Image: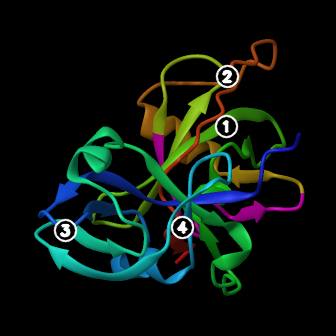
Amino acid sequence: MTKPNLTCVAAIAGAHGIHGNLKVKSFTADPMAFASYGPLLDEHGKHLFTPKNARPVSRFFSLAVVEKNTREQIEAMKSTKLYVPRDALPAEEEGEFYYSDLIGLDVINQDDEAVGTVHAVHEFGAGDTLEIKPLTGPSFYHPFTKHHTPTVDMAAKRIVILQEEADEARGDGYKPDASDSDKTDVDAPQIDQVSED
């Protein structure tokens, strides 16, 4: 059986109130959008909840759902990730990508040498940053801009980075070692659209 093409949009942080509402952490660029893509599913595509409405509460959202749940049932589902079908999300504009689509892409340098894979994408406030797991050594951060990351080829499932920039980010004279292939697949919970500006 093939795994459904799903994207994680939120996670249950606990119960909110006594009426069966969920306390939810959103992973979407527009934080309220997680409740607008239709039914929320588990990682296998099984229907969990049908959103009625969401309202912000501190750093989370209180989500009212159609299904009747007790506080105890919801608390037992704490940390459960909530998914929607990938095709329920809006199409990206040219030059924009969902974080989740970048995770796992191969990373090569401008000389077509393997560097590693994209382990995660972060937004630290100064712009989007790729966390790259190299073929050897510890992960490092790389700016996700057109200058530092000139090519994103979704069809070939690879990203081209400027090696000098990667060496500077690592703080050493790193050179990729093609004999080691420590690739990591990660199910990232972030689906923000990012652009290479």
Magenta stretch bounds? 141-155
Tag shown at residue 19: 3
Tag shown at residue 145: 4
Q: CA distance from mark 1 to mark 3?
A: 44 Å
Say few, some or many: other residues with alpha carbon within 10 Å of mark 2 (under 14 / 14 to 19 / 20 or more).
Answer: many
Q: Earlier in the sequence, mark 4 or mark 2?
A: 2
Q: Residue at coordinates 81% horizontally, 43% vertically from top-left? A: 111
Residue at label 1?
A: 117
Q: Earlier in the sequence, mark 2 or mark 3?
A: 3
Q: Where is residue 61 drawn, in percent x and y? A: 24, 70
Q: Can residue 125 be found in the magenta stretch?
A: no
Give the structural element (helix, strand or loop) at label 3.
Answer: loop
Say few, some or many: other residues with alpha carbon within 10 Å of mark 1 (under 14 / 14 to 19 / 20 or more).
Answer: many
Q: Earlier in the sequence, mark 1 or mark 3?
A: 3
Q: CA distance from mark 1 to mark 2?
A: 8 Å
User: 156 or 177, which is in the foreground?
Assistant: 156
Residue at label 2?
A: 135
Q: Where is residue 43 drawn, in percent x and y? A: 61, 47
